[in-house]
């Protein structure tokens, strides 16, 4: 894996084989960051990277100027690798938390401009993950939540969902902090929203 842009541009990062991870492909990652950089100023963004794995997304965020990134993973080897890599690259903006994401989210009180989550594709609790983020109000008012998932997952009817992109086998669903659509009636124009 490599860091695509920013102060660590083209830096290759080699993760050990014993990590139970599936890093986001470079093509998908580059496409994702092209979208994000058109929507938010990464140099003013606090970010939360859930199921961080190798730290692939966290490194890219820091390299592109994020002042603070929190990476969360429950695997000790992943946490150790992210910490070692962050130290090696002098990424003081990156903090690492060893925790199960589903236990971490209900107890966490900070708010973020960007939340990225890449749970294992065989995760059985995608809906719970999304619910925890919105129930605990972890996004700032203009915040964005990006969920990476396989093709069988569909959040197109979720009120906060505003976009979906597919890059090979990688799917990203984008959610906004405020609801985009509230009901089927509103989507059909049957209810006027004059707020």
Image (spheres, rainbow, N blue to C red):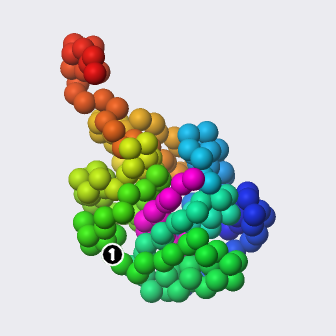
Q: Image quadrant of residue 85?
A: bottom right
The reply to whether residue 123 is visible in this rendering is yes
**Per the image, is 48 magenta?**
yes
Q: Is residue 175 above or below residue 188?
A: below
Which residue has dot 1 on it? 100
Residue at the outermost right position: 10
How many numbered discs? 1
Instruction: Please tell me which residue is depicted at 58% across the width and 71% down the height of the picture.
Output: 93
Q: Where does the magenta region start and end?
A: 44-56
> Toward the viewer: 177 or 167?
177
- In this picture, residue 37 sits left or right of residue 165: right
Q: Is residue 143 above or below residue 82?
A: above
- In this picture, residue 117 sits left or right of residue 35: left
Q: Image quadrant of residue 195?
A: top left
> Toward the viewer: 117 or 104?
104
**Per the image, is 23 magenta?**
no
Q: Position of residue 49 (x, y in %)?
A: 47, 64
Instruction: Please tell me which residue is depicted at 62% across the width and 64% down the height of the picture.
Output: 62
Q: Position of residue 35 (x, y in %)?
A: 59, 42
Q: Image quadrant of residue 191?
A: top left
Instruction: Please tell me which residue is depicted at 29% across the width and 53% down the height of the picture.
Output: 137
Q: Position of residue 4 (x, y in %)?
A: 72, 58
- In this picture, residue 92 sits left or right of residue 135: right
Q: Quadrant of the N terminus?
A: bottom right
Q: Secondary structure at mark 1?
A: loop
Instruction: Please tell me which residue is depicted at 68% across the width and 63% down the height of the picture.
Output: 63
């Amino acid at each position: 894996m490599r860091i695509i842009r920013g102060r660590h541009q083209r830096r290759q990062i080699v993760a050990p084989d014993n990590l139970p991870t599936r890093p986001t492909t470079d093509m998908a990652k580059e496409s994702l960051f092209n979208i994000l950089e058109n929507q938010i100023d990464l140099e003013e963004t606090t970010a939360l990277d859930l199921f961080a794995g190798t730290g692939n997304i966290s490194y890219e965020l820091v390299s592109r100027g994020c002042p603070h990134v929190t990476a969360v993973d429950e695997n000790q080897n992943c946490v150790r690798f992210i910490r070692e890599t962050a130290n090696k690259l002098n990424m003081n903006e990156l903090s690492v938390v060893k925790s199960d994401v589903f236990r971490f989210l209900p107890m966490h009180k900070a708010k973020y401009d960007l939340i990225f989550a890449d749970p294992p594709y065989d995760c059985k609790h995608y809906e719970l993950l999304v619910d925890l983020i919105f129930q605990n109000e972890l996004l700032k008012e203009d915040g964005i939540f990006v969920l990476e998932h396989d093709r069988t997952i569909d959040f197109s009817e979720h009120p906060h969902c505003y976009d979906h992109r597919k890059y090979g086998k990688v799917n990203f669903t984008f959610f906004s902090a405020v609801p985009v659509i509230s009901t089927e009636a509103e989507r059909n124009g049957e209810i006027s929203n004059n707020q």
